[in-house]
Image (cartoon, rainbow, N blue to C red):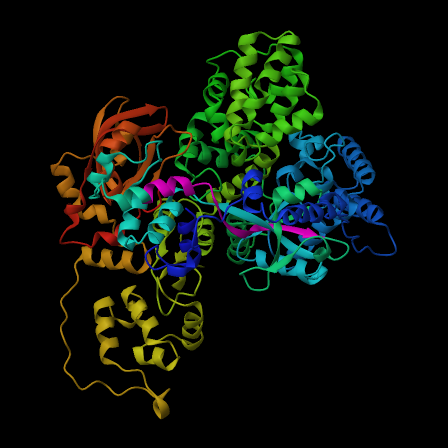
């Protein structure tokens, strides 16, 4: 293993490593007896090590962390400054007559912040938010910050905690005696501006990003070991692509043989054995996604600072857990793609419709928005666009903001594994009585029908029903707070159950509650996080509901993000009545844009960013030089657009306004050299050669080229060209599934969009396929997946047989058989163009 790690570090193979490997096996920490034997003739050497060790008295406890005093105005202290800003924000939110409940919450929180001396921390976060808003960067505080009315008044979060009754003690508590943790999300495209502002304000000797340690996972481990052991790139890729979970005995012989490997090959067996050993090893020291440590004095006096690989970034060697143990405060400057999308949508709404939208002024509790959500019409919407969320929406039927909070939290590993989802839904639908064994638990679980869905509820149950101390409850919370702590909840089982028995609860109830909380060991969602996310869910849903043109345009301009490719976003926009126009050298900009039409919505003009391989700076040259519009290709040459960019535009069929379809445009480009020297800017002479009649491209060829150039087509869907063949095989369209009954045996086919195998699904694979009529969701159980592994993983056009499973508006196909129908496209397209199946989560 040491030799393999050396090869990984040195980027060589075991056969070529030579003297880079250690010459013997003595490089390890030896037991005392072995050290005494080795140095039996030099006893002073061992005694000297003890002298040196005893002289080293340094302890991490001696490090004194001091948070920087924030700049204030007019001689105010940080606490006075925070108080002033908080009440100013309260008046901006509520007017001069601030509700009594809010006044009491602000006073309580300000007293506690003063007691804990955290005013400077709040002022730092407020300053970052202030800077972002000055630069028109959308941001949103989330997580525990949503519990704080002070954060709401300061504009750090847009969630009013008094409206959904979140507890400030979940955010800050004297009993836990831990620093506050405020996460602020910024637009992912502009977050770097905020990061550099922190460096500029505090200096690189006082501010740095926290480190992270990544571990070897299965695919990375097999790649690293395979390369070190001298396997070819193709072999390594094939191994990493088909391996499932490693078992104690390694990989089954049959699966290796099925993929063309010799299971008795000694080197292959070594690779698999070493891979199992390597999994879980630390792989590299990286930087946190945005967690900053800031100090009053020099940070370099406390820990080493190093240059990150990214330009203009520095970080420390300690990770999040290290600084938590040392009591260092961390400022989280995080990135969120949906904020980029929403900000761009706000800008488009202002330009096109004269609307001045913000996160705070979107009309609340709009029935039309909730109708759309209940129909699971949520492609592109934040958090509720996944297959699992879309299946849950028609069952949960959200009708208010708190329903969205529950929706965000309930489709998570914790509630699913803890068997909380079905009891909640049955109680919500009146199919099961809502019962509370005590008045105390009714107060805790009343909002969630007696089922614990959030971390905060788990903490309260442990204190009220099981007699946990606040410290023990916080330890329980921490065990539910991260995937890394999986399994730690079980350690609280005996104390929780015995405590509930002691307080008069039945053993059946106590064990059921513990099983539900144990599910949180695979990640339980905090109510405060869910509330912050629910706000963005509602805002993105509102925009999609009333301005689908704006939403689709902003979403495409913010890619990559979410579950869906541009093709699905465009198809969804057209279903909502939005006209989509193709890439055009005389009309398109780099970004997708909106154009005025006679219809209800603006038309969506595809931008040059949708064309693969184009550079933004080249397209800015094109836009700057077109003036009244290009009429000849040589004018684009004269504008300085590189020939390679023009070829990509031709393949995207962008020269239609010049009267040139893609094949004609490519021909013209091939026989027209760009002007050089004195001839730059001069109109080219008419070519002397005769006009060539090029063969016409078929509709299928056009669609192929559209997908190759832009990953989508406005002409037709690829499956439409083989629909006649599919009908001959008695394969129904995805739209016809809506007319089926529960239990019907069906055959359906489509392009594979997504394959997912969640860790909570016991090996079940969920597949989403698409044809020209819509999308279908498939369920493949583990045994069937093992049987049909090859067609499932290798099909671009997948056909399945199975039973229709229908529960209200939720429709799935439970698969019984799978077939690879890629051959139907032969002669029409190269199937690699339609390979959307790479996203196997």
Q: Eyeballing the image, is 317 above or below 650?
A: above
Residue 209 lies, in percent from the top left, at 62, 53
Picture residue at 50% right of the left edge, 25% below the top? 519
The mark total stands at 0
654 to 768, vertically: above or below: below
In the image, farthest residue toward the front: 41
Can residue 756 be seen by looking at this rendering?
yes
Q: Residue 417: x, y in percent?
A: 46, 25
Left or right? Give the position of 153 relative to 797: right
Viewer can see residue 595:
no
Q: Residue at x 80, y 33 (%)?
A: 108
Q: Is residue 32 above or below residue 653?
A: above
Residues 408 and 700: in front is 408
Instruction: Decide: is 744 above or below 321.
Output: above
Outermost residue on the bottom side: it is 678
Is 529 in front, or is 646? 529
Whether residue 275 is in magenta: the answer is yes
Q: Is residue 52 left or right of residue 341?
A: right
Q: Using the rendered view, name the quadrant where residue 40 is placed.
A: top right
Q: Is residue 520 left or right of residue 560?
A: right
Residue range of the region highlighted in magenta in the rendering: 271-294
Residue at 64% across / 7% down in the picture? 504
Residue 147 in magenta?
Answer: no
Q: Quadrant of residue 715?
A: bottom left
Furthest toward the left, the residue is 728
Q: Quadrant of the C terminus?
A: top left
Can you give x and y, in whole percent of width and height, for residue 689 in the image? 16, 84
Q: Quadrant of residue 440?
A: top right
Rendering coords of residue 259 (x, y %): 22, 42
């Amino acid at each position: 293993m040491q030799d393999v790690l050396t090869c990984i570090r040195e980027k060589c193979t075991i056969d070529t490593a030579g003297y880079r490997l250690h010459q013997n096996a003595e490089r390890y920490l030896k037991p005392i007896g072995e050290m005494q034997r080795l140095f039996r003739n030099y006893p002073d050497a061992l005694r000297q090590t003890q002298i040196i060790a005893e002289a080293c008295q340094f302890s991490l406890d001696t490090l004194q962390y001091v948070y920087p005093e924030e700049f204030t105005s007019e001689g105010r202290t940080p606490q006075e400054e925070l108080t002033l800003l908080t009440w100013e924000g309260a008046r901006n939110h509520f007017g001069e007559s601030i509700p009594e409940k809010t006044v009491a919450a602000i006073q309580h929180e300000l007293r506690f912040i003063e007691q804990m001396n955290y005013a400077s921390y709040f002022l730092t976060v407020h300053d970052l938010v202030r800077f972002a808003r000055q630069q028109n960067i959308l941001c949103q505080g989330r997580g525990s910050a949503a519990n704080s009315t002070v954060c709401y008044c300061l504009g750090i979060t847009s969630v009013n905690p008094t409206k959904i009754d979140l507890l400030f003690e979940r955010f800050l508590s004297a009993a836990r005696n831990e620093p506050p943790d405020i996460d602020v999300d910024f637009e992912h495209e502009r977050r770097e501006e905020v990061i550099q502002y922190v460096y500029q304000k505090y200096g690189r000797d006082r501010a740095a990003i926290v480190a992270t340690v990544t571990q070897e996972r299965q695919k990375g481990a097999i790649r690293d070991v395979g390369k070190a052991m001298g396997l070819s790139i193709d072999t390594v890729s094939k191994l990493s692509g088909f391996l499932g979970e490693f078992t104690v005995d390694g990989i089954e012989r049959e699966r290796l043989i099925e993929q063309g490997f010799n299971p008795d090959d000694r080197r292959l067996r070594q690779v698999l054995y070493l891979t199992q050993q390597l999994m879980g090893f630390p792989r590299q020291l990286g930087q946190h996604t945005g967690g900053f440590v800031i100090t009053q004095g020099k940070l370099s006096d406390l820990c080493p600072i190093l240059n990150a690989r990214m330009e203009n970034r520095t970080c420390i060697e300690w990770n999040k857990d290290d600084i938590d143990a040392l009591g260092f405060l961390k400022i989280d400057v995080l990135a969120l793609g949906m904020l980029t999308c929403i900000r761009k949508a706000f800008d488009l709404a202002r330009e096109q419709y004269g609307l001045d939208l913000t996160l705070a002024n979107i009309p609340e509790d709009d029935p039309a928005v909730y109708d759309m959500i209940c129909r699971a019409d949520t492609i592109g919407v934040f958090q509720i666009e996944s297959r699992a969320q879309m299946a849950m929406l028609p069952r949960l039927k959200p009708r208010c903001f708190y329903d969205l909070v529950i929706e965000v939290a309930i489709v998570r590993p914790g509630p699913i594994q803890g068997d909380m989802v079905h009891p909640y839904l049955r109680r919500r639908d009146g199919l099961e009585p809502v019962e509370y064994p005590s008045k105390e638990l009714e107060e805790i679980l009343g909002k969630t029908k007696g089922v614990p869905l959030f971390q905060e509820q788990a903490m309260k149950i442990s204190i009220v029903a099981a007699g946990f101390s606040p410290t023990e409850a916080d330890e329980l919370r921490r065990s539910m707070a991260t995937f890394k702590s999986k399994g730690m909840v079980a350690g609280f089982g005996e104390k929780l159950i015995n405590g509930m028995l002691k307080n008069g609860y039945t053993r059946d109830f106590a064990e059921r509650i513990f099983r539900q909380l144990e599910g949180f060991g695979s990640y339980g969602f905090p109510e405060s996080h869910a509330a912050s996310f629910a706000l963005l869910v509602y805002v993105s849903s509102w925009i999609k509901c009333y301005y689908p043109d704006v939403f689709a345009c902003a979403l495409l301009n913010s890619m990559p993000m979410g579950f869906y490719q541009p093709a699905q976003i465009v198809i969804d926009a057209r279903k909502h009545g939005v006209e989509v126009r193709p890439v055009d050298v005389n009309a398109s900009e780099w970004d997708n844009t909106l154009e005025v039409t006679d219809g209800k919505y603006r038309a969506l003009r595809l931008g040059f960013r949708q064309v693969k391989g184009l550079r933004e700076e080249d397209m800015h040259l094109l836009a700057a030089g077109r003036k009244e519009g290009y009429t000849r290709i040589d004018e684009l040459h004269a504008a300085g657009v590189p020939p390679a960019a023009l070829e990509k535009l031709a393949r995207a069929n962008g020269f239609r306004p010049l009267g040139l379809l893609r094949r004609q445009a490519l021909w013209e480009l091939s026989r027209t050299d760009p002007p050089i020297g004195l001839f730059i800017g001069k109109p080219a002479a008419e070519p002397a050669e005769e006009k060539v009649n090029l063969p016409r491209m078929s509709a299928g060829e056009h669609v192929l080229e559209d997908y190759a150039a832009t990953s989508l087509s406005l002409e037709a869907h690829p499956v439409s060209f083989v629909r006649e063949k599919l009908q001959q095989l008695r394969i129904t369209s995805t739209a016809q599934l809506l007319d089926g009954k529960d239990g019907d045996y069906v055959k359906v086919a489509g392009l594979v969009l997504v394959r997912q195998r969640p860790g909570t699904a016991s090996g079940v694979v969920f597949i989403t396929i698409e044809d020209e009529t819509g999308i279908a969701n498939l369920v493949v159980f583990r045994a069937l997946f093992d049987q049909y592994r090859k067609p499932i993983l290798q099909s671009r056009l997948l056909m399945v047989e199975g039973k229709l499973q229908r529960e209200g508006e939720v429709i799935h196909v439970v698969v019984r058989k799978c077939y690879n129908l890629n051959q139907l496209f032969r002669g029409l397209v190269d199937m690699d163009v339609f390979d959307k199946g790479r996203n196997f989560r």
